[in-house]
Each structure stands twice: as structure tokens, then as C-alpha cells.
Image (tube, rainbow, N blue to C red):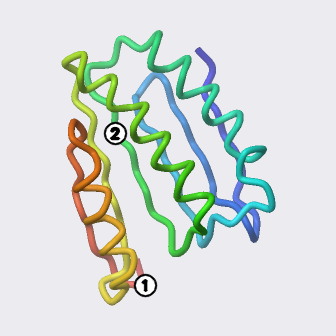
Amino acid sequence: MENLFIAETNRTPSVRLDSQTGTLEFSGHRCMPETSMIFFAPVNDWIAKYIKTTSNKKTEVIFKLEYYNTSSSKSFIDIFKALEKLAIDGKQVILRWFYEADDEDMEQNADDMKDSLRYIQVEKITYSQNQ
């Protein structure tokens, strides 16, 4: 299975999906695509294929965004919920949610994810803007 890389723009994050290592990374300043369905279509296709074909015992999701809009939030929830299928099948899935130490909104978003994801381990990780 080929990896997927989408370069960061001023409106969308960097997306790095690596099937060999099981590392799925969403990072950058913001995620507010004009049409989230179009932006996330290749990501959703890749995730669906990964879930069906991976032999990785562990999948690590790195989430490090400063901001994302409501339609992107829905897309991320759909991605994380899909990945729960791996955990239900006995594989380890970890969501590492990075947020700036003083960003209460992103910390709350991490808590909300933790509450809504039953099978994925969510780790909140703070960082300073200099990191």
C-alpha cells in the first residue's frame, strides 16, 4: 500500500499517512479547507484501505493543529471512529493530541475526543510555541 502525503497550505494541514510504520500525522497551523469533503476524500479512501489491509499491531495518530473548523472536526471524528475498528480487532491505536500549553480550546477538544472514542487511547501532550 502506498503512503499518502498532502503538503500544508495556508488553509489545510500537512497530512502524512505511512502504512509501513502505522503513523498517521495531521499537523500544521490550521485546517479550514473550502470544501472539507473534497480535501478529506483521499484521506478517507486511504484510511479505509489501511484498515482492511494493515498487519501493523499498532497505529499511532499524531494530531498537532492550532485550529480546525467545524466541518473539519466532523471529518476528523469520522477518521478516528473508523480507526476504532482496528482497536476492536485487538490492535493498539493511540491518538497523540498535541496542543499549546495555554490553548484551552484545543485541550477541551482533546478531552471531547477522549470522551467520544471508546476504543482508542488518547494522550494529551502540551508543547510551547517554541517547540
Q: In this image, 50 relative to 94: left or right?
A: right
Distance of label 2 from label 1 (alpha carbons): 23 Å
Q: Nearer the viewer, mark 2 or mark 1?
A: 2
Which quadrant is home to the N terminus? top right
Residue density around tag 2, few if under 14, some if 14–19, many if 20 or more, within 10 Å:
some
Depth check: give the residue in front, 85 or 2. 85
* SS category of the residue bearing label 2: strand
Q: Position of residue 115 (x, y in %)?
A: 23, 56
Give how far across and how far down residue 30 sits, in percent.
Answer: 62, 70
Going by the numbered disc 1, the residue's amino acid type is Gln
Say the numbered circle drawn on residue 129.
1
Q: Tag 1's secondary structure?
A: loop
Snapshot quadrant of residue 111: bottom left
Residue at x 41% of width, y 41% of height: 80
- Marked residue nearer the N-terminal end (2 or 1): 2
Circle 2 sits on which residue? Answer: 60
Frontmost residue, 77 versus 59: 77
Identify whether 68 is placed above or below 88: below
Q: Is residue 18 above or below residue 56?
A: below
Q: Quadrant of residue 55?
A: top left
Q: Position of residue 6 (x, y in %)?
A: 70, 45
Quarter occupied by residue 70: bottom right
Q: Residue at x 39, y 31 (%)?
A: 83
Q: In percent of the image, x 21 and y 36: which residue is there?
A: 119
Residue occupying image coordinates x 60% and y 69%: 69
Give the position of the C terminus as an image quadrant: bottom left
Residue type at numbered disc 2: Glu
The answer to whether residue 76 is left or right of residue 90 is: right
